[in-house]
Amino acid sequence: MSLSTAEKIFLCVALIDFGSIFVWIGIALHLAYTKMDLMLDHLKNCPAVMIRAPFKDGGPSGRLFVQGAIMGLMTTPRLYLRDGGASAEDLKNFPADLKRKLIILHRTGWVLQLVMCGLAAVAEFDLV
């Protein structure tokens, strides 16, 4: 059985995306285990984060849940400031390098997820 060029490209993109998702999870877990206390210390006046803070003791999935809330807050702060879920002072005092890492991690996660959904759609509609 021989693969066509389109099938080879599809397979390469799928394998690269799947591998990238595992790398992304590793980076997210590393940040969650090494920087969680620092992030929570800087966001102690943000109810949207502090209500989820007890989940950090729930293992890897709990830490990723709390980190997801923090990434959402960093990516769309106006949404949280408007409804009182965030403190403007806490956001201003949050370390800039960590904020940049969280925003990049959040956006990269969305891109990887969209690529995987696109691959699923291509496979579902038999385009390859």
Image (cartoon, rainbow, N blue to C red):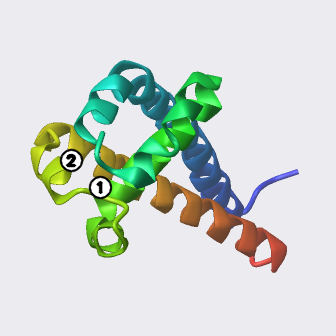
Residue at the image point whose x is 78% and y is 69% from the top: 123
x, y percentage for residue 19? 57, 38
x, y percentage for residue 82? 30, 75
Q: Which amino acid does label 1 sit on?
A: Met
Q: Which amino acid does label 2 sit on?
A: Arg
Residue at the image point whose x is 44% and y is 21% from the top: 33
Asked which quadrant contains residue 48, the reply is bottom left
Closer to the N terminus: mark 2 or mark 1?
A: 1
Q: Mark 1 points at which residue?
A: 74
Q: Is residue 95 toward the left or the right of residue 39 in the image?
A: left
Task: State the residue in front, 112 or 42.
Answer: 42
Q: Which quarter of the rendered picture does the C terminus lie within?
A: bottom right
The residue mark sitting in front, 2 or 1, is 1
Asked which quadrant contains residue 80, the reply is bottom left
Task: State the residue in front, 85 or 94.
Answer: 85
Tags 2 and 1 touching, CB below 8 Å:
no
Between the C-alphas of marks 2 and 1, the distance is 9 Å
Which numbered marker is on residue 100?
A: 2
How many tags in the picture?
Answer: 2
x, y percentage for residue 124? 82, 73
Residue at the image point whose x is 27% and y is 27% from the top: 38
Helix, strand or loop status at disc 2: helix
